[in-house]
Image (spheres, grey):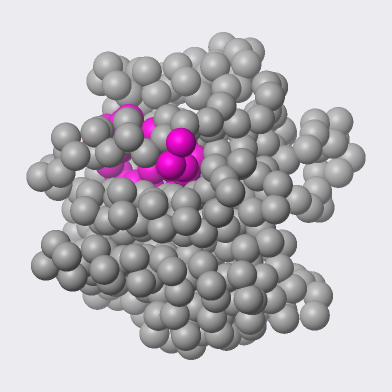
Amino acid sequence: MMALYRLARPAIFRMDPEKAHDLSIAALKRGLVSGGKIPVDDRLRTTVAGLAFPNPLGLAAGYDKNAEVPDRLLKLGFGFVEVGTLTPKPQDGNPKPRLFRLAAQGAVINRFGFNNCGHADAIERLAARRRKPGIVGVNIGANKNAADRVADYVQGVTSFAPLASYLTVNVSSPNTPGLRDLQAANELDRLLDYVIAARNGEAAVSATAKVPVFLKVAPDLTLTQISEISAIALKRKVDGLIVSNTTLSREGVDRFVEAHEKGGLSGRPLLGRSNAVLANFRRALGPNIALIGVGGVFDTASLVQKIEAGADLVQLYTALVYGGPALPARIVRGLLDHVRERGLDSIRPLRDTRVEEFAESHALGA
């Protein structure tokens, strides 16, 4: 499958990036896309927030925005898939063009702005797969013109708590004006207070287990902000943090014409900074809260770096654009080889082994 993708990629890359993305979703729907051989091994299994993951590699939110193909994506080798970001009302997002490849750098810039179908359509799709196996998280956000953004997140909880393996509160996108302001201490404390109360209320009413709640944060944070966010996350008892989203920085790509497009940068150039932010969150939060590392993962080596920097689970997205559908299984096979070579019984001994090194590897500012 990888050889076929390499042959097809030049033609795909001549297409408008967003049209190519839509085409990939359509191909998955029709069963025209398959991945590589997926390893199944107890050494890859990990339990996070009460959920048993077959392997630690997940697909980040943003690819399957409307929960159209989560099960097809799981079959590519992902241990879990996160759909969304979903807002209560459908919205078109920002004007096109809004997706730009920086192919030589293995990077992408997007300024989508939470384009999605809204809750109602996604609820219908997720309800239809309710009894299917596989961990599918739902990433929730607020509409651009919401009168009360906190209320939008609460609505996301009530809409998807019965259907999601976990919920992600996304306050990290740079493409909705003012959204990242919700990372400020007072705003975040209020938001998580309402979200956790809504989650607990849904569990009480339905007499079911509480769905785990993760908080997704930006990579463009100072050490002070990391400390404040960590304190609030512990206070409100979120189940974990997803670190991180796209960056507004153009470090490493600023000499390229495409880098001057507005939006969030993802892909290889983000690896260093995202690892440093991840490791600093691990230092601030301690060993017990779950962390999902995102940003710059392209291969097994970069996935292992995330675990060494403090991640329990790891997500990718941009790498799928460049590596194709065989990439997830190939990365997971590489992880199994790494664990075997180290003589380990699980991936857990890898976690936190380089936290201090990565925490000091990138200047984040006070």
Q: Is residue 268 left or right of residue 239?
A: right
| Residue 251 seen | yes
Is residue 166 found left or right of 207 in the rendered image? right
Q: Residue at x 35, y 56 (%)?
A: 157
Of 129 and 253, nearer the camera is: 129
Q: Is residue 74 magenta?
A: yes
* Quadrant (top left/top right/bottom left/bottom right) for the C terminus: bottom right
- Determine if the magenta segment contains residue 221: no
Determine the residue located farthest toward the front in the rendered image. 147
- Residue at 24% from the left image edge and 33% from the top image edge: 124
**What is the chief secondary structure element of the magenta stretch?**
loop
**Which residue appears at 41% of the width and 66% of the height?**
195
User: Measured along the vertical axis of the image, is residue 322 above or below residue 228?
Assistant: above
Kindly identify the residue that appears in the image at 58 percent across and 63 percent down. Answer: 217
User: Of 94 and 326, which appears nearest the observer?
Assistant: 94
**In the drawing, does residue 114 fall left or right of residue 41?**
right
Q: Position of residue 188 (x, y in %)?
A: 57, 70
Q: Quadrant of residue 346?
A: bottom left
Task: Indicate whether 15 appears above or below 290.
Answer: above
Quadrant where the image shows the N terminus: top left
Give whichever of 186, 364 is nearer the camera.
186
Relative to 35, say whether 340 is above or below: below
Q: Which residues are magenta?
A: 60-89
To which quarter of the image does residue 154 belong? bottom left
User: Residue 264: in sight, yes or no?
Assistant: no
